[in-house]
Amino acid sequence: GAGVSQTPSNKVTEKGKYVELRCDPISGHTALYWYRQSLGQGPEFLIYFQGTGAADDSGLPNDRFFAVRPEGSVSTLKIQRTERGDSAVYLCASSPSGALNEQYFGPGTRLTVT
Amino acid sequence: GEDVEQSLFLSVREGDSSVINCTYTDSSSTYLYWYKQEPGAGLQLLTYIFSNMDMKQDQRLTVLLNKKDKHLSLRIADTQTGDSAIYFCAERNQAGTALIFGKGTTLSVSS
């Protein structure tokens, strides 16, 4: 079956611009996660959704970052006033009912802020 | 706070065994994980171990857990060139809502 998909695969934007990154989880997975992976680092947790609500947003670095999941499936990560330090690969994962043992990752969106 | 440490590089010859080591800080971690990341591909869950186990074997993979020392290792038997990748150790965060990853160990397999 289809895995987690993310669009776009690459995004180049200028400093100060607004960007949206999209994640389509595996059908039927109620839990959705966003991570950020900087060069040479492991993925770093950003936010976790259970259904439509953000169950844990403690990883969001500041108020420029926001994520939504209005219908409990597709999620959008929104970054305002982008900074060069936001350049990273943004990974989305989903799992059935929040089981971390069954977390499936998408291929990621590579964001470059110039 | 939670933290996961790994050595950054490992180089082995094809056919040898590879051992990738990891230390973690949260003694209450219930599950510990190994992920594989190949260039251009997503993170792939290789295996995980529950904290009440000392060892788990899955085909060529053996996971050893030393809870006293908070040390986790992944042994790959008969390493192949296709095993070349970055391997991440991960533990659950205290809330149980997400994973905390190490920086990854780059495994290079030469023929």
Image (cartoon, rainbow, N blue to C red):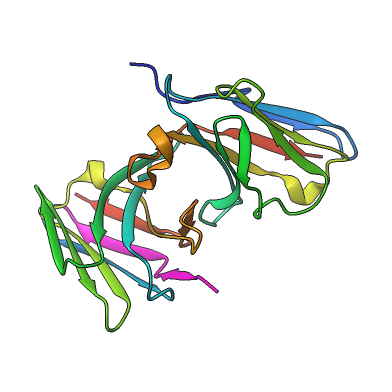
Residue B5 magenta-highlighted: yes
Residue A10, position as x, y percentages in the image: 64, 28
Residue B71, position as x, y percentages in the image: 30, 75
Q: Nearer the viewer, residue A33 or B42?
A: A33
Q: Nearer the viewer, residue A45 or B59?
A: A45
Q: Nearer the viewer, residue B59 or A114?
A: B59
Tally the numbered discs.
0
Q: Quadrant of residue B45?
A: top left
- Which quadrant of the rendered structure holds the C terminus of chain A? top right
With B48 as the anchor, is B5 left or right in this view? right
- Residue at image x 35%, y 49%? B35
- Residue at image x 25%, y 66%? B51
Residue A31 magenta-highlighted: no
Q: Does residue B80 sit above or below B96 in this rendering?
A: above
The segment highlighted magenta reads B1-14
Tell me if residue B14 can be seen.
yes
With A64 as the anchor, is A23 left or right in this view? left
Q: Nearer the viewer, residue A37 or A72?
A: A72
